Image (cartoon, helix red, strand yellow):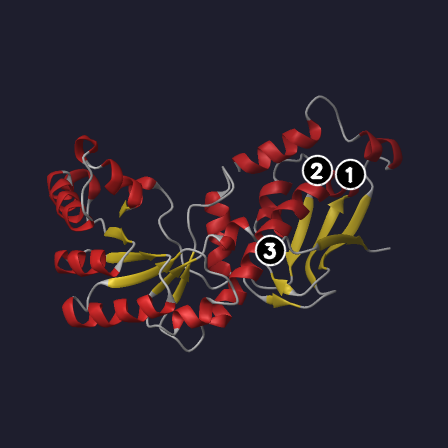
C-alpha cells in the first residue's frame, strides 16, 4: 500500500493528469485489457485492486490467469472496466508493478526449470530494490523459488565480515562463531525463538572444522564444482543433517552443474537484481 502511494505521488504530486483531464470527458466509461507482450511468468496482478482503491471513481477488474502462470505473447491477463480517467491515470503505475514482478518471476522460473530433477532448491537473497523486498521475494515464490531471510532479525547468518571483525576485532573461526551464536540464542530465546544458524565457509578446511558444530546451514561461497562435490561428501560423513548452500557467481548457464553436485540450496542474487521486466501493456477495447 505504501509503495502504491509513493508511485502515485511520483506521478501526481503538484498537479493532475492534465492530458487525461483535457481529452477525456468526465464520467466516460472504458474497458482495457492487460496484455503480456512477451512470454513469461505473470506476477503482481493483486496490485490492481490496491492501485484502484486509491481513486474515488469505481473500477472493476477480472483476473484472467493465475498468479505464477506461464503466459504467451499477446495473452490477456486481466480485464479492467470503469472510469476511463482512472484507468488512464493509473496505467503506468499498474504496468510498473506487474512488469517488474513478472520479470522476477520469469527469471526465477528459468532457474527453477534448470535444476529440475536435482535435490537443489533456488533461493533469493537480500539484494533487492530498497522498499520492494517483500514484493520482490513474493515474485520469486511465484516463479517457483524459495525465500532466504527477509530481515536481519529472521536468522543468524554468519558471513566473512562477521568473522573478520569477530570479538574485539581479533577475528574468529566459523566454528567458534557458531558456538557463540548458539550461546547467544540460548540467552535470548525469549526474543529469538527457534532461529536457524547459517555460517559461511570459504574453504573446505573451514567446512571440515565447522560441521561438528552442527549449524543448520553452511553457505559454501564461490567454491568450484569439484570443491562443492567434496563438500557434499564431507557433509554426508560428518553431519548429514546439515544443509549446504552454494552461493557466489551463480548464472543460468552454470546453475544445473552446481545443482548436480548434491547441494541442497543455491542462492542467486540475480533473481532480483538482474531480472529484466516482462513487457506488459494496456490495450483499450474499442
Which residue is rendered at x = 31% and y = 66% of the image? 227
Residue 275: quadrant of the picture: bottom right
Disc 1 from disc 3: Cα separation: 28 Å
- Mark 2 residue element: loop
Residue farthest toward the bottom in the current orientation of the protein: 117
How far apart in space, not on screen, are marks 3 and 2 (Cα)? Answer: 30 Å
Q: Earlier in the sequence, mark 1 or mark 2?
A: 2
The numbered mark at residue 10 is: none
Q: Examine the rendering and report whether any part of residue 67 can be seen.
A: no
Relative placement, left or right, of 95 versus 24 is: left
Q: Earlier in the sequence, mark 3 or mark 2?
A: 2
Along the polypeptide, which appears first: circle 1 or circle 3?
A: 1
* Label of residue 103 in the image: 3
Q: Nearer the viewer, mark 1 or mark 2?
A: 1
Q: Is residue 262 left or right of residue 214?
A: right
Quarter-wise, where is residue 238 in the image?
Answer: bottom left
**Above or below, comparing residue 262 to residue 23 in the picture:** below
The residue where tag 2 is placed is 57
Residue on which the image places disc 1: 85
Residue contact at pointers 1 and 2, CB within 8 angstroms: yes
Amino acid at each position: 500500500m505504501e509503495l502504491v502511494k509513493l508511485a502515485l505521488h511520483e506521478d501526481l504530486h503538484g498537479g493532475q493528469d492534465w492530458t487525461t483531464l483535457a481529452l477525456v470527458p468526465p464520467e466516460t466509461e472504458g474497458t482495457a485489457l492487460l496484455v503480456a507482450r512477451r512470454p513469461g511468468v505473470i506476477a503482481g496482478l493483486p496490485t490492481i485492486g490496491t492501485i484502484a482503491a486509491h481513486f474515488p471513481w469505481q473500477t472493476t477488474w477480472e483476473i484472467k490467469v493465475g498468479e505464477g502462470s506461464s503466459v504467451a505473447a499477446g495473452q490477456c491477463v486481466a480485464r479492467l472496466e470503469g472510469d476511463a480517467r482512472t484507468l488512464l491515470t493509473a496505467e503506468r503505475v499498474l504496468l510498473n508493478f506487474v512488469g517488474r514482478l513478472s520479470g522476477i518471476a520469469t527469471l526465477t522460473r528459468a532457474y527453477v526449470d534448470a535444476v529440475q530433477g536435482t535435490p537443489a532448491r533456488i533461493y533469493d537473497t537480500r539484494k533487492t530494490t530498497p522498499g520492494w523486498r517483500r514484493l520482490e521475494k513474493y515474485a520469486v515464490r511465484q516463479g517457483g523459488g524459495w525465500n532466504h531471510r527477509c530481515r536481519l532479525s529472521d536468522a543468524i547468518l554468519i558471513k566473512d565480515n562477521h568473522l573478520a571483525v569477530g570479538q574485539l576485532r581479533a577475528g574468529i573461526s566459523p566454528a567458534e562463531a557458531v558456538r557463540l551464536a548458539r550461546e547467544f540464542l540460548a540467552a535470548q530465546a525469549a526474543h529469538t525463538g527457534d532461529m536457524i544458524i547459517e555460517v559461511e565457509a570459504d574453504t573446505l578446511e573451514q567446512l571440515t572444522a565447522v560441521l561438528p558444530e552442527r549449524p543448520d546451514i553452511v553457505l559454501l561461497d564461490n567454491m568450484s564444482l569439484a570443491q562443492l562435490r567434496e563438500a557434499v561428501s564431507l557433509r554426508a560423513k560428518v553431519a548429514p543433517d546439515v544443509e549446504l548452500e552454494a552461493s557466489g557467481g551463480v548464472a543460468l548457464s552454470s546453475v544445473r552443474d552446481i545443482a548436480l553436485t548434491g547441494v541442497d540450496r543455491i542462492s542467486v542474487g540475480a533473481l532480483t537484481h538482474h531480472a529484466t521486466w516482462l513487457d506488459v501493456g494496456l490495450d483499450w477495447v474499442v
